[in-house]
Amino acid sequence: MLDEGAAGAAKVAEPVLSTLAQTTLGAVTLVAVALAVLAVYKLVKVQDQRTKDAQDAIKQYSMLSGRMDGAFNRMTTTIESLVLAENNAQQLQREEIALIQQLKNSIDTTVRDAVLTARAFAPRRDR
């Protein structure tokens, strides 16, 4: 009789345990699905943020690259101007040297002519 009661109780408890197991399994499955959906949502959100960060970095790089190009162009123009000014200064120096040489030759000729003229008109001293 005791065995019959236990067997009867087991028959009654079996559907309850099966339902409980299914419900627990269902609840765990629901929690697992919810966690998976949350993980996918978080992953998509992080990927969107990384994409935005990458786009911002590209914009900053483009702006920096544009500024660097502008600075390089200004520097190149400045260097070209300095080279041109140096070339002009060298040419002017060559012209000045040539002019000073002509002036020196002219002064030398004038002094020589003056000395020769002075000797020609100077009274001679005979000894």
Image (cartoon, rainbow, N blue to C red):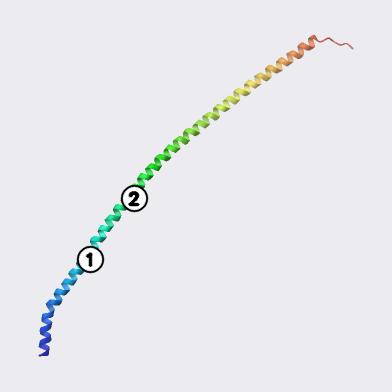
Q: Based on the displayed image, in which of its 4 quarters is residue 43 positioned? A: bottom left
Residue type, label 2? Asp
Q: Where in the figure is residue 20, as x and y percent of width and height? A: 16, 74
Question: Which residue was labeled with disc 1?
Answer: 32
Q: Is residue 1 above or below residue 124?
A: below
Residue located at (60% from left, 22% from top): 95
Name the residue carrying label 2.
53
Q: Position of residue 72 (x, y in %)?
A: 45, 38
Residue 76 in percent (x, y) is at 47, 35
Separation of disc 2 and disc 1 at Cα? Answer: 31 Å
Determine whether 125 is above or below 44 in the image. above
**Viewer-nearest residue: 113 or 56:** 56
Image quarter where the C terminus lies is: top right
Q: Secondary structure at mark 2?
A: helix
Foreground residue among 42 and 80 = 42
Rendered position, 66 above or below 30: above
- Tag 1, which secondary structure? helix
Residue at position x 24%, y 63% in the image = 35
Q: Position of residue 106 (x, y in %)?
A: 68, 16
Mark 2: few/some/many CA within 10 Å (<14, 14-19, 20+): few
For mark 1, does the 10 Å Cα neighbourhood hold few (<14), some (14 to 19), or many (20 or more) residues? few
Q: Is residue 79 left or right of residue 56?
A: right
Q: Earlier in the sequence, mark 2 or mark 1?
A: 1
126 above or below 53? Answer: above
Q: Hey, which quadrant is residue 101 in on the image?
A: top right
Amino acid type, residue under disc 1 in the picture: Ala
